[in-house]
């Protein structure tokens, strides 16, 4: 299940906006942004609709750009439909429905992986449950077989063992979320905002006590009452037409009888009698202040102006809260405001993270003053228009993807399910086109002057975590005899298809990767370009050979500091003006860095490409490095370091690399790249300028671009902005990767985090390879051991033992040495056994239990068949181009791997893993409650170092703890 995320409904107006071009483009005419009406014309998702006799509603959208089809099925059941005593049933059934059906026994990810499915998952929220996957066109019948089988042929496959096992998985999903900083706030928001008997009066994850009490009959009844075809919407989007879709859908779904009608919900919108204020404690870096209201649902006319209002208040980079509290008064380090839309009421969330050292009471008072003033006076015309342009561009970008979490299938399905209109997205655009500042002000005055819920989370120790039981079931591969499900003895009116085996998969063409053309600007910057026709947008990445590895050991965090400050002002524009220009242009400029590269990314709608490139060039070439901005960014980065020290995965990620690479190696620093408090506190303006002059330099730059534009036209634009750029000084010398790397020593480093509901396990060792080496074989072997959902380690710890919500092994490659990592968040009382289980799986794989024929076939088929779907979107194309250049591969590399996968043997994969890793050389970092896991770990008979844990008579090596480790203060 995905974590809850805000669904943006995109705003449009038809007013033309003007923006001055930056100083750098004096030789060019000032270019006005295209009117939003021009962007609106590009937002269209044509579809055809039909309904089967059993009530299944089907929407079909044709998009022939790739030989793939998105299959997205939405059930009109979510946690809002759960009665008292049965909370969590919808979410639990989302899990169970992935665990096999009567005619497709075993995990659904197995056949989906075999056919090369991409963008596959399932989610549950308040108003719905959905399942989605994008599959090769010739494998569509397999996906429809699977979806129809779990709709109409599930109950005979639901066993007590499966039920017990998935309760264990859900309990670990809950622990994983609860273990995050601020992870318990959502429960309290629900309790305070909604009455207990309201459909939204409990969280989607539900009560684990309710789940533990659920019987098999309870769960089967829940299914028969809610998951019939008449309560479902199926969307097929991609390489398909309506006539083909009708034939296939009727074949696979037509014989499923309709289920019971779902009672319609119509709850009253809750309003508090008086404001409610509460204080919670959590292991967090800084105090966070929340303000919450329940407002009308997404179909109410007031939803749209409320959404615009909250975006202006705290959703834009130039929002009121950002400008006042973060930039001007500097009493907060992060702010946000947004509306999460639901059918029966939406949630307004406003929050501010208090700057360390500030008086939280004074900050809360100031936040309330700003909110009250905004409600009283409303936004400006310019602010409303900037929301419209930004969101119109975002909607255009979304048109490139047919499926996944946010593609075209989702837009159609949401509209049909929530509003009985697949084109609701267009009506929402119309609403926003007519939204005025007066309408925004009126809606806020109507709904946000009601009593508020105010929660404050302050740093401190949580109460002791209330533990829940583990799953009791073991994974089974043989299911009960199939029994066709019928409702009230109804006979099927359509002949049942043959379900004795999965449908065959037809021929799948090899991926047709776009031709990559190259050119060189006047100053030597190499340009790589791929033409894309899907949407009228262009993406440009200016990539510098810098990254975190460019930081010297005494200035850790410098690269992140520089990337954060580049957007904070140029010699001609302030940070607010930069943010406002991006919003007016519908452009998105982001700056960030990984271990090896520092990238400046631009996404622009083509009518505004010139002005967007001007802005990008100004940001890159003319940073102001104002003292005021430097100090504000410094506080934000120091706060981020504090935040990492309260997050289990961040703690582990920052400890492991220095241990396995050594602190002298450029890769021997925390993966976040934020550095330490000591190094960040000491960074000066001269340090920032020097890094920019030496590393953000044309001699270090490569340009990657893709979009719906002629190559020469784009080159002329790039030459004008970057071809004449000489840099302000001499470029930095090449990075030195010659530092000695220590031998792996098979020890455990334990970081004490009291009252952790889970332990975070992270293990790693250096591989005898560089990133430029051929690691395709090792990657395939890793998929089987621990690299994906169906891997041995994940299936063991999640599906068999029920100790984890999910594990993942990775081959982490870079410009220099690669390393191998194993990550597993596990329930606290199984920490030691989980380490032993992972170690046993590795040794078993390297020993007598190598790759099986079934695992080889799944891995080869999945990797070959997923290729056409992997490069549907331009960001994926850009990522592949960048990887090919960094690792010295040909530009058509993606087209060559299919043949290589098909030539692989089990012995090849076994040898690749055996030559890469040594089970005795892993360094293990475990973040958890030492008081609860110490005895478990000592039973492993491995050297143990404890950090942040002081106790008498423990026999632990406290002297070896590092004072400046990420977890050292805990």
Image: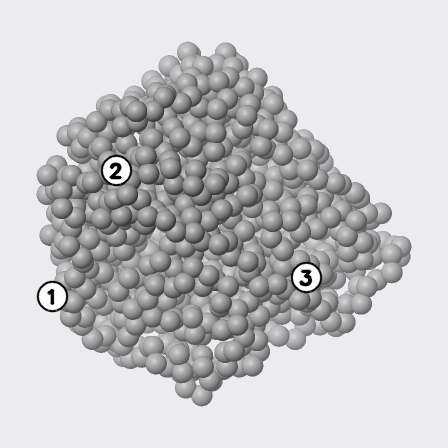
Report crowding for label 2: few under 14, some 14 to 19, many 20 or more residues within 10 A (C-alpha): some
Residue 651 lies, in percent from the top left, at 27, 55
Residue 485 lies, in percent from the top left, at 79, 60
Q: Which residue is drawn at 35% across and 52% down?
A: 464
The answer to whether mark 1 and mark 2 are in CB contact below 8 A is no
Alpha-carbon span between mark 1 and mark 3: 62 Å
Residue at mark 3: 138
Between circles 2 and 3, the one closer to the viewer is: 2
Between circles 1 and 3, the one closer to the viewer is: 3
- Mark 2 vs 3, N-terminal side: 3
Asked whether residue 215 is in view, the answer is yes
In which quarter of the view is residue 268 placed? top right
Residue at mark 2: 724
Q: Give the answer, above or below, for where 537 lies relative to 167.
A: above
Residue at mark 1: 959
The answer to whether mark 1 and mark 3 are in CB contact below 8 A is no
Q: Give the answer, above or below, for where 344 lies relative to 657.
A: above
Q: So how many labels did they put on this image?
A: 3
Alpha-carbon span between mark 2 and mark 3: 50 Å
**Helix, strand or loop under label 2:** loop
Give the colour scheme shown. one colour
20 sits to left or right of 665: right
Alpha-carbon span between mark 1 and mark 2: 56 Å
Q: Give the answer, above or below, for where 485 lies relative to 924.
A: above
**Helix, strand or loop under label 3:** helix
Q: Residue at x 57, y 63 (%)?
A: 510
């Amino acid at each position: 299940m995905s974590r809850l995320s805000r669904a943006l409904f995109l705003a449009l107006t038809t007013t033309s906006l003007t923006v001055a071009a930056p100083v750098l483009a004096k030789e060019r005419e000032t270019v006005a942004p295209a009117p939003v009406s021009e962007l609106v014309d590009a937002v269209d998702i044509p579809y055809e609709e039909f309904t089967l006799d059993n009530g299944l509603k089907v929407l079909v959208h044709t998009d022939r750009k790739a030989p793939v089809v998105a299959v997205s099925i939405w059930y009109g059941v979510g946690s809002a439909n759960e009665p008292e005593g049965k909370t969590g049933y919808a979410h639990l059934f989302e899990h169970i429905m992935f665990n096999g059906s009567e005619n497709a026994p075993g995990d659904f990810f197995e056949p989906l992986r075999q056919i090369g499915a991409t963008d596959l998952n399932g989610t549950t929220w308040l108003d719905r449950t959905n399942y989605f996957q994008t599959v090769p066109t010739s494998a569509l019948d397999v996906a429809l077989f699977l979806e129809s089988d779990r709709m109409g042929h599930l109950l005979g496959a639901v066993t007590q063992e499966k039920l017990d096992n998935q309760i264990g998985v859900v309990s670990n999903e809950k622990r994983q979320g609860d273990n995050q900083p601020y992870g318990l706030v959502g429960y309290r928001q629900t309790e305070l905002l909604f009455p207990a008997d309201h459909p939204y009066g409990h969280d989607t994850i539900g009560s684990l006590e309710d789940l533990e009490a659920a019987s098999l009959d309870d769960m089967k009844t829940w299914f028969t009452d809610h998951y019939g075809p008449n309560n479902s919407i199926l969307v097929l989007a991609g390489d398909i037409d309506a006539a083909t879709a009708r034939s296939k859908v009727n074949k696979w779904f037509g014989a499923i009888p309709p289920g019971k009608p779902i009672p319609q919900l119509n709850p009253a919108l809750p309003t508090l009698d008086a404001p409610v204020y509460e204080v919670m404690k959590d292991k967090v870096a800084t105090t966070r202040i929340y303000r919450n209201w329940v407002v009308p649902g997404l179909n109410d006319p007031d939803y749209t102006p409320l959404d615009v209002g909250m975006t202006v208040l705290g959703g834009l980079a130039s929002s009121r809260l950002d400008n006042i509290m973060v930039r001007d008064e500097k009493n907060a380090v992060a702010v946000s405001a947004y509306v999460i839309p639901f059918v029966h009421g939406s949630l307004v969330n406003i929050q501010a993270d208090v700057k360390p050292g500030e008086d939280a009471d004074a900050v809360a008072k100031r936040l309330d003053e700003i909110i009250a003033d905004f409600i009283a006076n409303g936004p400006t015309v310019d602010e409303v228009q900037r929301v419209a342009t930004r969101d119109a561009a975002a909607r255009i970008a979304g048109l490139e993807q047919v499926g996944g979490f946010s593609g075209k299938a989702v837009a159609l399905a949401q509209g049909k399910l929530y509003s009985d209109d697949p084109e609701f997205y267009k009506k929402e655009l119309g609403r926003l086109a007519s939204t005025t500042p007066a309408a925004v002000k009126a809606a806020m005055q109507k709904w946000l002057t009601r009593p508020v819920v105010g929660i404050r989370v302050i740093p401190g120790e949580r109460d002791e975590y209330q533990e829940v039981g583990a799953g009791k079931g073991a994974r089974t591969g043989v299911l009960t005899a199939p029994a066709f499900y019928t409702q009230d003895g109804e006979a099927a009116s359509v002949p049942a298809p043959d379900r004795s085996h999965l449908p065959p998969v037809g021929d799948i063409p090899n991926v047709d990767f776009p031709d990559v053309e190259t050119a060189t600007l006047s100053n030597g910057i190499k340009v790589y370009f791929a033409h894309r026709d899907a949407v009228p947008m262009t993406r440009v990445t200016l990539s510098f050979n810098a990254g975190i590895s460019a930081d010297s050991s005494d200035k850790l965090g410098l690269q992140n500091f520089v990337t954060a400050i580049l957007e904070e002002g140029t010699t001609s524009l302030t940070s607010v003006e930069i943010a406002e220009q991006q919003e007016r242009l519908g452009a998105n400029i982001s700056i960030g860095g990984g271990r090896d590269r520092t990238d400046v990314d631009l996404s622009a709608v083509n009518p505004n490409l010139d002005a967007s490139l001007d802005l990008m060039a100004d940001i890159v070439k003319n940073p102001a490095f104002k003292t005021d901005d430097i100090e504000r960014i410094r506080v934000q980065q120091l706060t981020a370091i504090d935040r990492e020290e309260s997050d289990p995965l961040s703690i582990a990620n920052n400890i492991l690399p220095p241990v396995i690479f050594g602190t002298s190696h450029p890769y021997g620093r925390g993966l976040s790249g934020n550095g330490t408090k000591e190094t960040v506190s000491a960074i000066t303006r001269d340090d920032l300028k020097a890094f920019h002059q030496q590393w953000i330099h044309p001699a270090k730059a490569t340009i990657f671009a893709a979009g719906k534009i002629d190559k020469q036209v784009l080159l002329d634009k790039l030459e004008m902005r970057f071809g004449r750029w000489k840099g302000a000084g001499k470029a930095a010398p090449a990075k030195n990767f010659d530092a000695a790397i220590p031998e792996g020593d098979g020890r455990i480093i334990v970081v004490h985090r009291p009252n952790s509901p889970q332990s975070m396990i992270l293990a790693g060792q250096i591989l005898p390879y560089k990133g430029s080496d051929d690691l395709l074989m090792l990657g395939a072997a890793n998929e089987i051991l621990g690299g994906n959902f169906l891997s041995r380690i994940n299936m063991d710890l999640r599906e068999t033992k029920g100790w984890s919500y999910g594990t993942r092994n990775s081959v982490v490659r870079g410009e220099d040495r690669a390393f191998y990592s194993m990550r597993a968040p596990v329930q606290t009382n199984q920490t030691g056994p989980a380490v032993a289980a992972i170690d046993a799986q590795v040794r078993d794989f390297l020993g007598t239990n190598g790759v099986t024929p079934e695992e080889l076939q799944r891995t080869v088929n999945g990797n070959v068949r997923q290729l056409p779907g992997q490069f549907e979107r331009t960001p994926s194309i850009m990522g592949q181009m960048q990887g090919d250049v960094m690792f010295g591969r040909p530009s058509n590399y993606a087209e060559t791997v299919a043949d290589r996968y098909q030539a692989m043997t089990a012995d090849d994969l076994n040898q690749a893993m055996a030559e890469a890793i040594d089970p005795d050389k892993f360094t293990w970092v475990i973040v958890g409650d030492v008081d609860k896991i110490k005895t478990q770990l000592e039973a492993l008979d491995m050297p143990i170092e404890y950090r942040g844990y002081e106790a008498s008579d423990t026999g632990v090596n406290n002297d070896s703890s590092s004072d400046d480790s990420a977890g050292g203060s805990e």
